[in-house]
Image: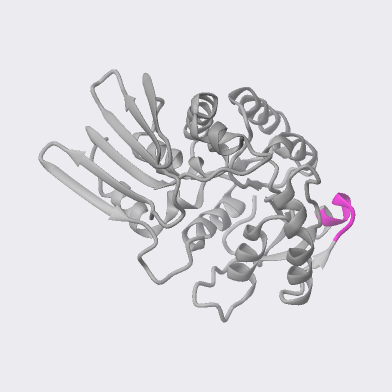
Amino acid sequence: MMEWGNPLIKIGLIGSDTTHATAFTSLLNDEKHSGHVGGAVVESFFPYYSPEISLSVSRHQEIEEKLVGEYGVRKSLLIEELACHCDAFLLLNLDPSSKKEWFRELSCYHKPVFIDKPLCLSSDEAEEIRAISQKSGTPFMSCSALRFETDFFQLVQESEERPSSVSISGPLLFEDGIPGYFWYGIHMVEMLVTIQKDLPSSMTLSFQEGRGEYIDFGWPDGRTAKVYGYLNWDIPFSATLTSGAHTRSVILGQRHEPLYKGLLKEVVSFFRTGISPVPFEQTFASIKILEWLSRHSKASKVLKK
């Protein structure tokens, strides 16, 4: 991997169908941006989108034009060409069902890969991605940006032990072409796993029509958690942690700083060291929980009728 004293990291971006492409590029490439993250720059991108997902189709052209016209990012029509011009990859394409095969192709170049959430759509695929990584020696990192949101990150860091009780809430949105909780529910699941670190031993889901879904989690040692997913975009993400007599809460997004700043700092560090700040075991736990929730969710089925 690159050493800290080495020059600017050149990034190759895959996926021109997500707003993360322009948001990440803005923070990395624009030195005048108030939330600028130094150390890396998006050098080129591969204009990929998914014809099967309507959101992907509707977004990609405008995003491509902005990457080229506003940020001066080179458009590469061949992955081989993209790889020649970069030190690391941002795999951002919207369709999670294609992430494993994309990673397999990119692993041939032995350069670190950040895989935008979700990593994939099943725990079996997650294991396959890890096997590809181990066989090729290609490091990867994957997570929600909320894991490194400043106030939430500080809340977790200040916790001396895993809390006995956790409450998390936020918007629960669904998107055609992306199963159940893998679209927006992943944010709350990632927050939960960031706090508790491991898989729960029990999960119970309740549905309230027109309002949302509520999930109760339990662990063998007595820890509990509740996640409230509201069918309302205006609900902010929040978390409350209770340890003994102490309770602490945070509402995410209250600071006047870009949401993705904390994440991108960690990604740039990962690109230099090849060491992900997110253990695979936690990424795997998130995928396992998302699998279960997506199978049992009533809200996603009702809203897609």
Q: Residue at x 81, y 53 (%)?
A: 83
Q: Nearer the viewer, residue 196 or 166?
A: 166
Q: How many marks?
A: 0
> From the image, which quarter does the C terminus lie in?
top right
- Give the image location of residue 270, x and y in percent: 56, 51
- Is residue 265 visible from the viewing direction of this image? yes
| Range of magenta residues | 76-82
Judge left or right: residue 64 versus residue 266.
Answer: right
Q: Residue at x 62, y 58 (%)?
A: 20
Q: Relative to 55, is 165 above or below?
A: above
- Give the image location of residue 199, x and y in percent: 41, 25
Whether the magenta-drawn stretch holds residue 80 is answered as yes
- Give the image location of residue 59, x and y in percent: 73, 59
Q: Could you say which quadrant of the image residue 71 lies in?
A: bottom right
Q: Nearer the viewer, residue 107 or 240?
A: 240
- Give the image location of residue 152, x and y in percent: 35, 53
Q: Relative to 14, is 186 above or below?
A: above
Judge left or right: residue 136 versus residue 294.
Answer: right
Q: Relative to 45, is 100 above or below?
A: above
Q: Residue at x 61, y 68 (%)?
A: 28
Whether the magenta-drawn stretch holds residue 271 is answered as no
Q: Nearer the viewer, residue 155 or 235?
A: 235
